[in-house]
Image: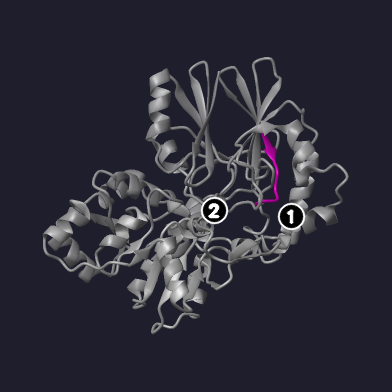
Amino acid sequence: MIIEQIYTGCLAQGAYYIESNGEAAVIDPLREVDPYLQKASKNGAKIKYVLETHFHADFVSGHIDLSKKTGAPIVYGPTAKPGFKALIAYDGQEFNVGELTIVVLHTPGHTMESTCYLLKDASGKAIGLFSGDTLFIGDVGRPDLAQKVAADLTQEKLAAHLYNSLRTKIMPLSDDLIVYPAHGAGSACGKNMSKETTDTLGHQKQTNYALRADMTQAEFIKEVLTGLVAPPAYFPLNVMMNIEGYESIDTVLERGQQALSPEAFEAAANETGALLLDTRDPQTFAKGFVPNSINIGIDGQFAPWVGAMIPDVKQEILLVCEPGREEEVVTRLARVGYDFTIGYLEGGFDAWEKAGKETDRIESIDAAKLSKRLQAGPIEILDVRKKSEFLSEHLVEAENTPLDFINDSMAQIDKNKTYYVHCAGGYRSMIFNSILRARGFDKLIDVKGGFKALKESAAFPLTDYVCPSTLL
């Protein structure tokens, strides 16, 4: 028997590979499906089922490609209405994988089709619960994402469904069950997830606020809805792709990996209206980049920030990457539905520079230099962290202009003034600076290392504030 969690840190997402006696099932697969195919082939196993816990919002699942390449049916729980062939299971239905049995537990609340899968061993003992976005470690799935599906479906009604699902389907299960959730800390599908990616159900009953035995439905609804922030704009678009279907990942990869000379890249940029996305390290980007590029570094929380900053998943994209990482970037864009990468700059920025093309740069200074400039006189400092981060602790002189709400933040900025921009560590501030630079704001200066470096320098007065839970 094999139970393997395949965790992707960028999305804080857990897919699962289950195998027994030459048969396998994959739960909530990522968009790129070759790793699952290779794993099964290596073990001499056949993928028998592709199980989906719900229609995902934060990533595009690989269910369609994996089903086409294996012949395995796609399984959803009750009430799901996909736009492609799938097996809609009934509550309590069982699926055999070798000597293992997988039982469908319909658990509406995060979405109405949300379903958990209970795994039983050869003796019939329940050993694991694949809980999707119904139950996380330390949290539960937010009940506000599916409220627009039906006119009378509110977040309060979904929260009530979730309360009942947890108490009738999950809490009665054995304490020694291992919980395998779909997400961990960093995902926008919950608000208080643990960094741990598995736990026993018994421990969750003791520590997870949503599983308190004495909690009333009204108390649950109030607590689960408190502190929710607006979901990323790309979530509804990913939901529709997961429901309706999408292009094969093979087609997306082939289109996106078109190598373009500097001349061809420049022509494509001028003729198509494509967005220029530079995925290099922020500080490398600052030293020189193709004019009007925006920087979202591949080595940070890449996919979620792409989703937050690029509103249209059908936007054509031209890439500037570190040479050799083009396929990785195209793949990670496709994971969140950005399928229209139309090529990359062959040889990267170095090739552009050697071709004598126009370049741009962003000034970036360290904490010591910022301190000297502050001593010389008043300066404008922009803190682009989340509001909750800012309220927790910030520089006395700073103004909060969150990257999450960049259009609102931009309205607060005077193009004629010089601003010093920082985030927590330097990743988000370069996204902010590059986007505004492309829109004509040319007096923004980046602060290397962000708030962490400023705090460690001990040269800046700080303001502490205990953030109310409603702002978290």
Q: Nearer the viewer, residue 453 or 183?
A: 453
Q: Image height check: is 459 above or below 133?
A: below
Q: Residue at x 34, y 76 (%)?
A: 442
Describe the element under mark 1 as helix, strand or loop: helix
Q: Report which quarter residue 214 is drawn in.
A: top right
Q: Residue at x 51, y 59 (%)?
A: 451
Q: Which residue is mark 1?
A: 224
Q: Position of residue 27 (x, y in %)?
A: 54, 35
Q: Which residue is mark 2?
A: 57
Q: Residue furthest left?
A: 355
The residues colored magenta run: 104-111
Mark 1: amino acid: Val
Q: Image height check: is 173 above or below 262?
A: above
Residue 173 visible? The answer is yes
Q: Nearer the viewer, residue 76 or 445?
A: 445
Residue 27 visible? The answer is no
